[in-house]
Amino acid sequence: MMPRFNKEVLCKYLKTKLDKNEDELFETNNNNPDCKIKSKEMKPFYYRDDERKNNFFYDLKACEDVKNYGGGAGQELEWKIRAIHSSSAMTYNIFSNNPFDKEKHRKVDIKEGKLPKGKYDLEYEKKLPALSNGSKANLDAFLKSDNNLIFFEMKMTEWLTGSPGKLSETYVSEIENGHTEKIPKEIAELFKKYYSVDKYSKEEKNGSSRKYYYPITNYFDVFQIIKHILGIYNGFKNDLDITDGKYKKVVLVIGYWTIPSDLMVGEKKLHDIYDKDLGVDFVNRLKKQIGKYVGKNGIKCEMEKEIREFCDSLKNVKELFFKEKEIDFSVIPMTVEDIVTCLDDKDKAKRNYLQKRYL
């Protein structure tokens, strides 16, 4: 079993980054008997439904983008987006603009950096066709300019505390049977590189037992990213939002949050900063968890190594996009700090909020 960061410890730390962390704002075992969060340890890290506005810099409900979060595969608006460790809430906080400024709130400016410079239209929870059975690839954010498209898959704590997703037998059946009309050969080969047909679990879903195949990665959610690549490829066939222009570059960003620098300090300084708010015993637990994260064989290095190896294996997929679509397609990893640095955001209060909460 590869090391994982303890979720409760990490969330308790994240709670210190909030301006309003009064306990009455959060779920408890008493205030919402119908709450979908079953773990009593995690309830203190989910805002109550009537308090979820506190999870955003700009209130999501004040913005027309609220509808985008209502129909995603994860039902983000219903409860997941209320978590202080929600990657969807983080994505909204990074890209959102004043919802009452109709000129700007769906616009994003990218300055010089790792991403193509320009002015972009913004969409959250972009859905693209994956398989012909109706399954969708749900991308967290989508930016479109006259010349370029940028798709974002964003992770906050998932890669630190959880395991990468498995691949359903629906995909594996199409791949193993060589149905290239549904999954092009180049993308099928990429899938096959990351699973073994004899390593799977059986799970009951919707009254039937199905196989789900394990990835060979330990931290990087590789199958999700390959599904996104398939969705983008298929999207150029039948999604008018991305076929109505001549695009020079199409970029898929693997975005991931990293432990802020205020935890990357010596033990004495860590106690000096957090003993008062968190207690000595808890800070000792936190320091132990940080030990899993740092170092040559730590969680961060291992995950970034997996991503690098994946990106190095994309030669045939890139050629597929260029041959069929004449598109310069790339997949690039970016930390949340990298992404925020690329944004030409003039809102100082929002920049300060992002710095305090996520960086």
Image: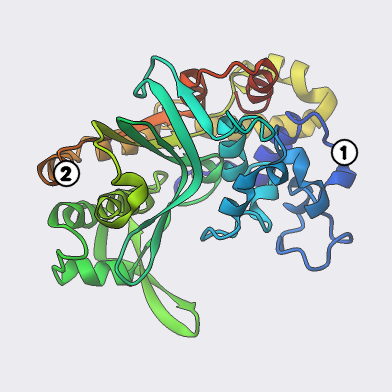
**Residue lying furthest left in this view?**
323
Against 134, is 113 above or below? above
Amino acid carrying label 1: it is Glu
Q: Secondary structure at mark 2?
A: helix
The mark closer to the camera, 2 or 1, is 2
- Residue designated by label 2: 325
Question: Tag count in the figure?
Answer: 2
Q: Quadrant of residue 128?
A: bottom left
Q: Which residue is at a point 84% across and 55% down the rendered structure image?
A: 28
Amino acid carrying label 2: it is Lys
Indicate left or right for 124 with 81 as reference. Answer: left
- Residue designated by label 1: 22
Is residue 78 something that shows in the picture? yes
Residue 199: percent from left, percent from top: 31, 65
Q: Which residue is at a point 77% across and 23% down the rendered structure image?
A: 274
Residue 87: percent from left, percent from top: 57, 42
Depth check: 182 or 298 in front? 182
Q: Which residue is at a point 65% across and 38% down the rendered structure image?
A: 10
**Residue lying furthest bottom in this view?**
207
Against 235, is 117 above or below? above
Is residue 294 something that shows in the picture? no
Depth check: 313 or 147 in front? 147
Distance of mark 2 from mark 1, alpha carbons?
52 Å
Depth check: 315 or 119 in front? 119
Against 124, is 312 above or below? above
Label 2 CA crowd tier, 10 Å (few <14, some 14–19, many 20+): some
Depth check: 193 or 59 in front? 59
